Each structure stands twice: as structure tokens, then as C-alpha cells.
Image (cartoon, rainbow, N blue to C red):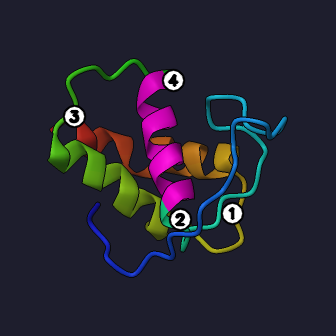
Amino acid sequence: MYYTDYKWSAREEKDDPRVTGEPDSTLLDRNEGYEVLYFVNAYFRKNDHSGISTVQYQFIERGVRACPGNIRSQEGIEKGIRENWINDLAE
């Protein structure tokens, strides 16, 4: 992970009906390492990016932090990354 200031609180996600396996309307705590890790992995699975590099992974992680604070859902953050950052990822 690019940032080192995350909280790492253990959570039981396997029984959580809100966890769908891809970015959804669930709110994302940008300070919780497990949530950001889940989001970035789900982002790459959903967008079929196989063989991702550390640079690409950290790029999306930084995009999570760069989205305005009023955008809080996983879907909203994913949309913000696609609209404002994704062209840079391909370069």
C-alpha cells in the first residue's frame, strides 16, 4: 500500500450482506486499510485488469484519497477515479 497511516481494524466481511464483491453503494472509510485494500482489489477485478503492477495498484489507492470528501460510496469513488484519473493509469 502507498499510504502508511491506515487503521487496520479486523472485520468479518464474509457474513456481511452488504459485501457484493465489487464497488457498490456501501460507504468507504478511506482511513481503514482493509476497506481500501478490498476496494482496490474489487476495482481491478471489476474492470478486468489482470497482471496489475504495484504502480497501478498505488495509483488507484491514491485516487481513492484524491476524490472529494463528499463522495463517500464505493460507486461514487470508482466513478470519480474513472472520470478524473483513469486515463493516467494507461500511460
Q: Is residue 37 located in the magenta-colored stretch of the structure?
A: yes
- Magenta highlight range: 34-45
- Secondary structure beneath disc 3? loop
Mark number, residue 67? 2
Picture layout, residue 37 above or below residue 8: above
Q: Is residue 91 left or right of residue 24?
A: left
**CB-based contact (under 8 Å), mark 1 and mark 2:** yes
Residue annotated with mark 4:
46
Q: Residue furthest bottom?
A: 5
Query: First in sequence: mark 4 or mark 1?
Result: 4
Between tags 4 and 2, which lies in front?
Answer: 4
Residue annotated with mark 1:
71
Classified by dominant secondary structure, the portion drawn in magenta counts as: helix
**CB-based contact (under 8 Å), mark 2 and mark 3:** no
Marks 2 and 3, how far apart at CA = 19 Å
- Secondary structure beneath disc 1? loop
Residue annotated with mark 3:
90
Task: Locate the N terminus by quadrant.
Answer: bottom left
Three-letter amino acid code at disc 3?
Ala
Pick the front one: 77 or 20: 20
Query: First in sequence: mark 4 or mark 3?
Result: 4
Q: Is residue 14 left or right of residue 25?
A: left
Query: First in sequence: mark 4 or mark 2?
Result: 4
In this orientation, does residue 72 appear? Answer: yes
**Where does residue 62 sit, x and y in percent of width and height?**
36, 62
